[in-house]
Amino acid sequence: MRKTTIQKREKASKKSKLAKRAVMFSTVVMCIMALTTVTAFAASGTVSTTDFVDKTITVLQSIVSLIGGGLGVWGVVNLIEGYGGDNAAAKSQGMKQFVAGLGLIILGIVVVPVLGTMITSAM
């Protein structure tokens, strides 16, 4: 009986590690793709400052939201892992990461456009 419980926990731990790697990889790939759009936009020849700032704000908003989403999904994986193993520390850390991810998404949606407005009005 005891061995099967330990084996189940080890399988769940391996699956959560795989899920965390997948979340990290997909978040990094999406951020790199967002950054390449700015590079491709800037390499297209003459660039007006206003267009470049607008595009950069859009990409920054996307990157902050993507990182927040990745952190939120990572937190959900930790939360599920904590409930599966009855681990209070993992549950707590998972909830903190989930809320931090939501905070980053809100930051990307609300604060970055305000900063963009400030930058364009200063030019």
Image (cartoon, helix red, strand yellow):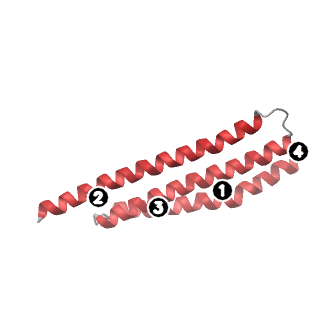
Query: How many numbered tags mark residues here?
Result: 4
Of 87 and 56, the residue lying toward us: 56
The residue located at (50%, 55%) in the rendering is 71
Q: Nearer the viewer, mark 3 or mark 1?
A: 1
Cβ atoms under marks 3 and 1 closer than 8 Å:
no
Whole-angstrom CA distance, mark 1 to mark 2, is 33 Å
Among numbered discs 3 and 2, the one appearing first in the sequence: 2
Q: Position of residue 119 (x, y in %)?
A: 81, 48
Of 122 and 59, the residue lying toward us: 59
Q: Which residue is mark 1?
A: 108
Whole-angstrom CA distance, mark 3 to mark 1, is 18 Å
Q: Tell me the element at label 3.
A: helix
| Mark 1 residue type | Gly
Q: Quadrant of residue 1?
A: bottom left
Mark linked to residue 96: 3
Mark linked to residue 12: 2
105 w.r.t. 38: above or below = below
Q: Position of residue 67 (x, y in %)?
A: 56, 51
Q: Tell me the element at label 4.
A: loop
- Mark 2 burial class by Cα count in 10 Å: few <14, some 14-19, many 20+: some
Mark linked to residue 123: 4
Among numbered discs 3 and 4, the one appearing first in the sequence: 3
- Mark 4 burial class by Cα count in 10 Å: few <14, some 14-19, many 20+: few
Q: Tell me the element at label 2.
A: helix
Among numbered discs 4 and 1, the one appearing first in the sequence: 1
| Mark 3 residue type | Lys
| Mark 2 residue type | Ala
Q: Quadrant of residue 77?
A: bottom left
Cβ atoms under marks 3 and 2 closer than 8 Å:
no
| Mark 4 residue type | Met
